[in-house]
Image: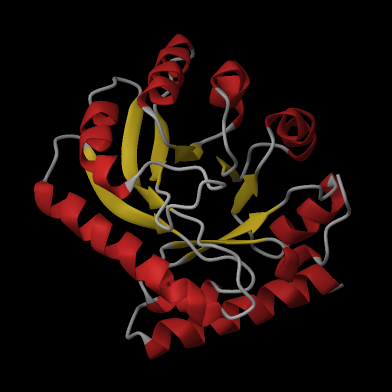
């Protein structure tokens, strides 16, 4: 029996394919992450049954309760701001960390991952807009930060992530996505040892099609899959 969640995912994948076609891209190179913040395990399982293989969580405490209930047969990605004192939980729960924005955090992630014999895939979060309310490294600091993070033994630098300022118009996000893609290209051209610039995590429910047109490889979609979130 189909569910509303399955129908939503089918619609999103069709929109992803159309956006990829407009950009001359292979849709197979774009992954859909279901952002499951505040979503209960049963509804997450419906998304998994409908083909979702990536799940994103924003809050460590919520993830600590939810991931054991759902299971780790899928990839779990930490996409929210991460405090250093929560790293000890994160390294056993998540496969990817999208929000590495400072060396201190990366050092703790590597240290804790090493204690568990793991190598974590990480993305460096960039504050492309320069907004004081946004997390992320400054674009001017990214080359050196990537070099330092890549030197850590238990982290694998795989790309960049950003979150543009909120806007009702998806087109307003485009300059920020373009800026992240160009920054990725600059880092790739630098050919830093241990740094692979394969991933661009950008685009959410309201602007993922624009993100795909500008090179996103991972889009982070919650509301369009699960509906309006309940308040936390």
Q: Could you tell me residue 206's position as x and y percent?
A: 63, 73
Quarter of the picture containing the C terminus is top right
Colouring scheme, one of rainbow, by chain, secondary structure, one colour: secondary structure
Residue at image x 71%, y 65%? Answer: 50
Position above or below: 123 against 114: below
Position above or below: 49 against 75: below
- Can residue 16 be seen from the camera position used here? no
Residue at the extreme left of the image, as rendered? 190
Q: How many marks?
A: 0
Q: Could you tell me residue 68's position as x and y percent?
A: 75, 30
| Front-most of residues 138 and 231 | 138
Position above or below: 63 against 225: above
Residue at image x 48%, y 14%? Answer: 112
| Front-most of residues 174 and 97 | 174
Q: Which image quadrant for residue 91? A: top right
Residue at image x 65%, y 58%? Answer: 34
Is 230 displayed left or right of 185 in the figure? right
Residue at the extreme front of the image, as rendered? 132
| Front-most of residues 16 and 124 | 124
Position above or below: 159 against 153: below
Q: Could you tell me residue 53's position as x and y percent?
A: 59, 54
Residue at image x 27%, y 34%? Answer: 145
Quarter of the picture containing the N terminus is bottom right
- Can residue 53 be seen from the camera position used here? yes
Q: Could you tell me residue 205's position as x and y percent?
A: 64, 69
Residue at the extreme top of the image, as rendered? 115
Q: Which image quadrant for residue 213? A: bottom left
């Amino acid at each position: 029996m189909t569910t509303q969640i399955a129908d939503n995912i089918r619609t999103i994948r069709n929109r992803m394919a159309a956006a990829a076609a407009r950009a001359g891209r292979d849709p197979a190179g774009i992954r859909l992450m279901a952002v499951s913040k505040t979503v209960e395990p049963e509804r997450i399982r419906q998304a998994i049954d409908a083909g979702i293989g990536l799940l994103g969580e924003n809050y460590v405490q919520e993830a600590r309760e939810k991931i054991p209930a759902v299971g780790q047969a899928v990839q779990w990605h930490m996409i929210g701001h991460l405090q250093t004192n929560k790293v000890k939980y994160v390294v056993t729960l998540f496969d990817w960390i999208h929000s590495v924005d400072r060396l201190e955090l990366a050092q703790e992630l590597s240290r804790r991952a090493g204690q568990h014999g793991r190598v974590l895939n990480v993305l460096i979060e960039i504050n492309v807009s320069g907004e004081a309310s946004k997390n992320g490294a400054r674009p001017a600091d990214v080359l050196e930060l990537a070099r330092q993070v890549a030197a850590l033994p238990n982290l694998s630098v795989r790309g960049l992530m950003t979150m543009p300022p909120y806007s009702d118009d998806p087109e307003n996000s485009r300059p920020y996505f373009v800026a992240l893609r160009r920054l990725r290209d600059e880092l790739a051209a630098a050919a830093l040892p241990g740094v692979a610039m394969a991933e661009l995590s950008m685009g959410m429910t309201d602007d993922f099609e624009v993100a795909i047109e500008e090179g996103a490889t991972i889009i982070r979609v919650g509301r369009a899959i699960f509906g309006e979130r309940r308040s936390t």
